[in-house]
Image: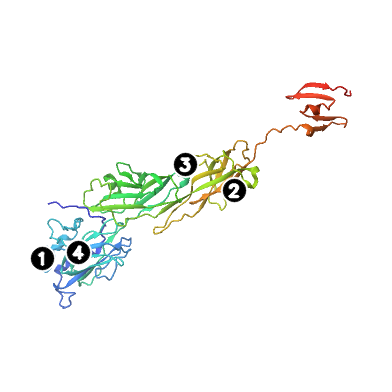
Amino acid sequence: MSRKYAPLGRRMVAAAGALSLGVAGVVATSVAAVATTDDPSYGTINQDKTGSIIVHKHLKNDTGTVGKVDGTADAGGDTVDGVTFKAYKVSGLNLSKPADWDKLATLVGNIPSNACADPAHPTLGDTAPAVDTDAAAEGTTAGGGLATLANLPVAAYLVCETAAPANIVEKAKPFVVTIPFPNTTNGGDGKWLYDVHAYPKNQKIEIDKTISDQTVNGVGLGSRVQFPVSTTIPTLDAYTNFTYFYMRDRLDDRLTDGKVDKITLGTETLVENTDYVQSNTGGLVVVSFQRAGLAKLKANPGKKVEAIFSGTVSALGDGTIKNKATLVQDTHYGAIPPNEPPSTPPTEPNDPPTSPEVSTDWGNAQLLKFDANSGAAKTGIQGAKFKVYNAADPYAASCESAVKSGDPISVGGEDTFASAANGVVSIEGLFVDKKQGAPDAQTVTPDHSQRCYVIEEIEAPAGYTLPSGGKEFTGITVKAGKTTSAAVTVKNSKQDVPGLPLTGAAGKLIMMLGGATLVVVTHDPNVAAWCDRLIEIRDGRIHADTTAKGARA
């Protein structure tokens, strides 16, 4: 019969060095000399005594510290709560028989990685001693990574890690402990230990999320927002493979057309529909790694895998758009990689690794275009046209003297904005700021609550002059979640027109040199009748020159 390699959830490369050494110690002491003392710590095993296995659960660290089975030295590292262990009696061994102690030697270095793959049927292999299917004891780490599997009669036990938090990559490798356990390793005193301390270790996986530079993707409504989501690939042993690996980002309802733009593993760009597939269900964008992609993940421990999620800003609401990403993964022990993973996790984990929350803030702007001659009334003018630009210093203390930078901004698909009948120009949807929150932060508030922009008047209403000489540019302030209005005004003066002729008694009078002649310019024939000489000028040319009757030569 071949070994069965069934999925086992999030596995962990077992750092149970003390336990591995402990099994070797058990074998070595099978031929040790019998002590001549009544101390139960030495000599003949008390077959009626019960003991316990005290599990110290830590994350892997770089110190290489080895704990002691008598509990006098800890293996170190951050503790992990919420990890469940079960102890299954190896019923095929009787520790009252010397020959069965010798059988333990066959297990040294040969405990199958998949011994606990099926918790209902733990096994040490087809030819190994049998294992009970019901657990003799169970415990979950708490209060600093501690769990006690108590009231264990004298026997050998297969210890399995059966459940772990969702951020744990692999469960600990199965290991065998005897009650009592010979304290003959790592400076042990050679006593029989009925309370045995074990130090299996895990490594956890985390996920990070940031926001790309928004000025690259657009700062107006209708722009794309990109969210790079990444994690570092853990190290799996030779007989451990990823069962599935999902990176997920639930986008805000105001972010439409959500998708993944690109995925990289280190410097390699992964191929969609070969290494991974993506989906968007109700705004939940999911990257599911395929079999080829899972193999690449395992082959590149320590490298960063990054998926760039994106969505289009289609509405502002309160102006603050927040979201987080999650990671769902599982591993199994087995020499053969899994088939294509399911499109969704078979079981939704509790509290999966979650990224810090990120936030983008947006606001609206309004300005008033009015008639410069209307005084305090500021009567609005319809038909003035404007363009909007980024400011060279977007977060200046004051935006009044802001200087434009770059090309005109598109907002909602438009890059030209006209004043309405009341003179109001509305620009709805301009970027203010972004921020990545701290890992455990409950709220995220960007560093800046307002941002400067510059508007340029490019066309004046009919009958009005277009400002020039720098007066066509106006700095405006856009505040997060608000409409900035009223305070920003732009006035226009009326056009100059040809001067109207003045007629009648108020006609234009010109005194000629010498003071003898009075020249009158008029269109009124009654006034002209007063003059001695009449000169008719039209279109800049003299058409008639007559002397009135009785005029002096």
Which of label 1 and label 2 is nearer to you?
A: 2
Q: Which residue of the protein is positioned furthest toward the front in this rendering?
A: 526
**Three-letter amino acid code of the residue under disc 2:** Ser
Q: Mark 4: which amino acid?
A: Ala
Question: Considering the numbered disc 4 on the image, is that residue within a helix, a strand or a loop?
Answer: strand
Estimate the x, y position of residue 550 in percent, counting from the top left.
Answer: 88, 23
Quadrant (top left, top right, bottom left, bottom right) of the C terminus: top right
Q: Is residue 444 visible?
A: yes
Among numbered discs 4 and 3, the one appearing first in the sequence = 4
From mark 4 to mark 2, how far is it between C-alphas? 74 Å
Q: Which mark is residue 78?
A: none
Circle 1 Cα neighbour tier, 10 Å, few/some/many (<14 / 14–19 / ≥20): few
For marks 4 and 2, the one nearer the N-term is: 4
Residues packed near mark 2 inside 10 Å, few (<14), some (14 to 19) or many (20 plus): some
Badge 2 or badge 3: first in the primary sequence: 2
The residue under label 2 is: 401
